[in-house]
Image (spheres, rainbow, N blue to C red):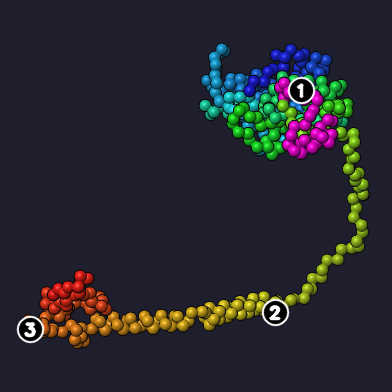
Amino acid sequence: MLLPRWWELGDPCAWTGQGRGTRRMSPATTGTFLLTVYTIFSKVHSDRNVYPSAGVLFVHVLEREYFKGEFPPYPKPGEISNDPITFNTNLMGYPDRPGWLRYIQRTPYSDGVLYGSPTAENVGKPTIIEITAYNRRTFETARHNLIINIMSAEDFPLPYQAEFFIKNMNVEEMLASEVLGDFLGAVKNVWQPERLNAINITSALDRGGRVPLPINDMKEGVYVMVGADVPFSSCLREVENPQNQLRCSQEMEPVITCDKKFRTQFYIDWCKISLVDKTKQVSTYQEVIRGEGILPDGGEYKPPSDSLKSRDYYTDFLITLAVPSAVALVLFLILAYIMCCRREGVIQLVHHSAIQKSTKELRDMSKNREIAWPLSTLPVFHPVTGEIIPPLHTDSYDSTNMPLMQTQQNLPHQTQIPQQQTTGKWYP
């Protein structure tokens, strides 16, 4: 972002402070920039003094070109250096800036800007801002102080104030002197006031707006509040008629006759315009009636006597322990009765235990080899040949794995039983 210097705009300026500092534009030549304060760092190694007015927009530019000469190696005249530089600003002795002062720097390769609207409470109190510059390439730092001396304004606050929401601008773009001058010039053509000041500029993100998508060069949006000494023009009040209010409720653009005077450069959301008439506001301030600061007489103070009676806390101790213990015991007994005596499935558990017991007995019996083998396992004679057929299992066979029913197999000594075929013939 390039913010032009005031002397590039060709305005007569008054020197204030030590060295080159605050520049205030002449009302005769700049009109819309009356009392709008812009300051730029000069290349003098000392604290800067600026003199903004309360209730008027204050803008202070932190130029990277100035701080480049603070970091070694020092560039020679004509040498181009483009180190990334960032700034940190805070009120001296505090971690942050005053509530009315904001700061923005979009990238380390752009200038930083301090801006805001001083309040009347700080009039006459010097505000010292510590400015620390960081060179992101060499990690060098440089620090300067900015002394803000807030002055009181004779016409503060202006009775008629209007706040515009500009959709196609970012805050650092709107803070540029020529852009703000063009906007105030367009407002002056519509409003026709004698005095017109820029009061404040606020980013839409500070009002709860969403960060725009990085497509189609979308902008964040910015709120600009201006003040004047004459009532609002008929064009500005067109947004208050019922037809335009209905269109705004339906998310449609209202019909404003003077919108074409802004449309060439500024896209204004007329549904978000705010018109404030401070002449009609009823003051809610109530004067505080202060008394003498003496409390009513309540008599002499009587301290307690030295002979205090002792108190026995044994009963309180027993009650404190006995009552919770009794309640806990009752709850424990109820829970034990529910879990043990009223438990469902007791019969199933007994049946399961009996099955486990029987299974164990059968396994113990199967491991006992002294028990006689069943007759089905003893040697038998073949009915045809008369030969002795060995038993199905030897003595070393593990009977615990023996199935209850043997699979029928065609052993060599077994007699095959003729089977009937589907064709009606018999085969041995």
Q: Is residue 43 left or right of residue 349?
A: right
Q: Nearer the viewer, mark 1 or mark 2?
A: 1
C-alpha span from label 1 to label 3 = 126 Å
**Disc marking residue 409:** none
Nearer-N-terminus badge (3/2): 2
Residue 169, percent from left and from top: 68, 27
Q: Nearer the viewer, residue 327 or 299?
A: 327
Q: Are marks 1 and 2 in contact (CB under 8 Å)?
A: no
Q: Residues within 10 Å of mark 1 (few under 14, many from 20)?
A: few
**Residue type at tag 2:** Thr
Image point (48%, 79%), residue name = 345
Q: Nearer the viewer, residue 184 or 354?
A: 354
Q: Nearer the viewer, residue 340 or 137?
A: 340
- Tell me the residue that label 1 is attached to: 260
- Tell me the residue that label 2 is attached to: 315
Residue 125, percent from left and from top: 78, 32
Residue 406, percent from left and from top: 23, 76
Count the labels in the image.
3
Please determine whether, in this image, residue 24 is positioned above or below residue 145: above
Residue found at the far front of this picture: 424
Q: Is residue 258 magenta?
A: yes
C-alpha span from label 3 to label 2 = 102 Å
Q: Nearer the viewer, residue 287 or 327?
A: 327
Whether residue 102 can be seen here:
no
Whether residue 271 can be seen here:
yes
- Tell me the residue that label 3 is attached to: 386
Which secondary structure lies at badge 3? Answer: loop
